[in-house]
Image (cartoon, rainbow, N blue to C red):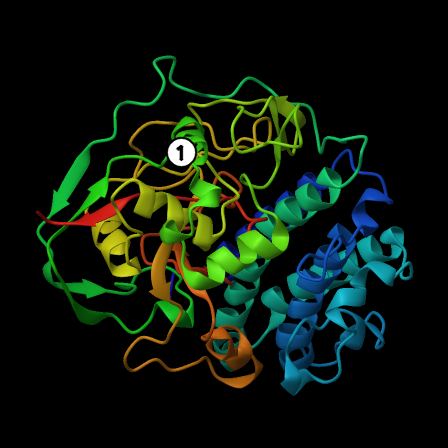
Amino acid sequence: MSTTEDDLSREALLRSCAAVRALSAALTEGLDPEDQALQSMPDASPTKWHLAHTSWFFEALVLVPHAAGYRAFDERYFELFNSYYESLGPRHPRPMRGLLSRPTLAEVWRYRRHVDEALRQFVQSAGASTWAAAAPVLRLGLQHEQQHQELMLTDLKHAFSLNPLRPAWRPATAPARAPAGPSPVQWRPQAGGLVALGHAGGGFAFDNELPRHPVWLAPYALATRLVSCGEYLDFMRDGGYRRPELWLSDGWAMVQAQGWRAPAYWLFDEPGAPGDPAPSQVFTLHGPQPFDPQAPVCHLSAYEAAACAAWAGARLPTEGELEHALAGTDAPDLRYDPGWMQPCQPGAAPAGEAWQWTRSAYAPYPGFRPLPGPAAEYNGKFMVNQLVLRGGSCATSPGHARPSYRNFFPPAARWQFSGLRLARDAA
């Protein structure tokens, strides 16, 4: 973790803790207990579990090792809400999180209040040496909860999409979209050369963003905006899901095995032939909404993104190309609007709206060192069989993303807000 003294001040962390924990609570407003117990697939988790697990993180990694005299809310929770930390003991199986009718949602909220109060007391009373050891882990816990805030939304969206009633997380407001629609795709040339990648210092960074290191980039060009839904529909109408020459081998196998014919959550009036007509609607966190050809396409797997790029005579960017381009811009804060939690801005903002798939394997940087203690399991052990995504999405918590941020998912993942920016080699 890279931090400054100000970042680790007690007052700053107390304010951040209150804000982050409050946002998690706000995201559950309007949801019934039944909604928060849903687990629609092994890769997703119930909202209730996210609320408990993020509290478990603070309890297991901050309070138990550092707060003298701390008493656990319930010792059994150390197993129930451990995600993947082998060093911290046994875990309830991930695919069975939706079977946890107990503890109840009310009990989970009592657990959160217990942890919040214990954190407040610890931050205010910890001695200097104890605070120096615990503060970076507390900051990690806040970033960890922000990651789960996005997962709360994407996991709930997947679960709601499987309900024939097509429920909504909350009502929609009008999307904040430029009235002119997307501009024609233009290409922004990048000279490349020897560039520095990785977190440059100042503020928080995960261990997978470090160390900063030199990378050689050949000259390249990036599209000035994300691929739109209308452009992706053109790919589909040109036989995109029926042309194996466009696809990576594993991707074509997934198309055949899963019957993919369109991005996730596109809704068709003619379910027998979704590759040709435009969808009538798209399922969103606000329920079914009219299909908007101007909006950035999302909920693509890396395989679909790569096939569309090949069809367009382009390719997926590398993570180095995206970071280098993003670092050279004055990117505004990412749009975050609970009234329209769906990609909608078609303009040339360098980041936000949808995560951008890259063709880069999620691997350690040269000289990578995992965090000490149990937090060593946070990132490093997942550096295989995954691809990097960059840029943030409409569901990324405010202040969480940055140019060096490395998100990662398996290439077949579609339930995240994952989209596509085209790249190509310099002419």
Residue 45 position in % (x across, y down) = 72, 57
The quadrant in which the N terminus is found is bottom left
Check disc 1: other Cα within 10 Å, few if <14, some if 14-19, many if 20+.
Answer: some
Q: Quadrant of residue 188?
A: top left
Q: Is residue 41 above or below residue 271?
A: below
Q: Which residue is mark 1?
A: 238
Q: Is residue 182 above or below residue 179?
A: below
- Say what secondary structure mark 1 lies in: loop
Horizontal side, residue 44 vs residue 373: left or right: right
- The structure residue drawn at horizontal position 43% and vertical position 81%, both measured from the top left corner, is 370
- Residue, far top: 179
Residue 288 position in % (x across, y down) = 67, 26
Q: Is residue 75 above or below residue 309?
A: below
Question: Is residue 61 visible to the viewer in this orientation of the structure?
Answer: yes
Q: Nearer the viewer, residue 120 or 24?
A: 24
Q: Nearer the viewer, residue 220 or 310?
A: 310
Residue 121 position in % (x across, y down) = 67, 65
Residue 412 position in % (x across, y down) = 53, 58
Question: Is residue 71 visible to the viewer in this orientation of the structure?
Answer: no
Q: Quadrant of residue 284?
A: top right
For badge 1, the amino acid type reads Asp
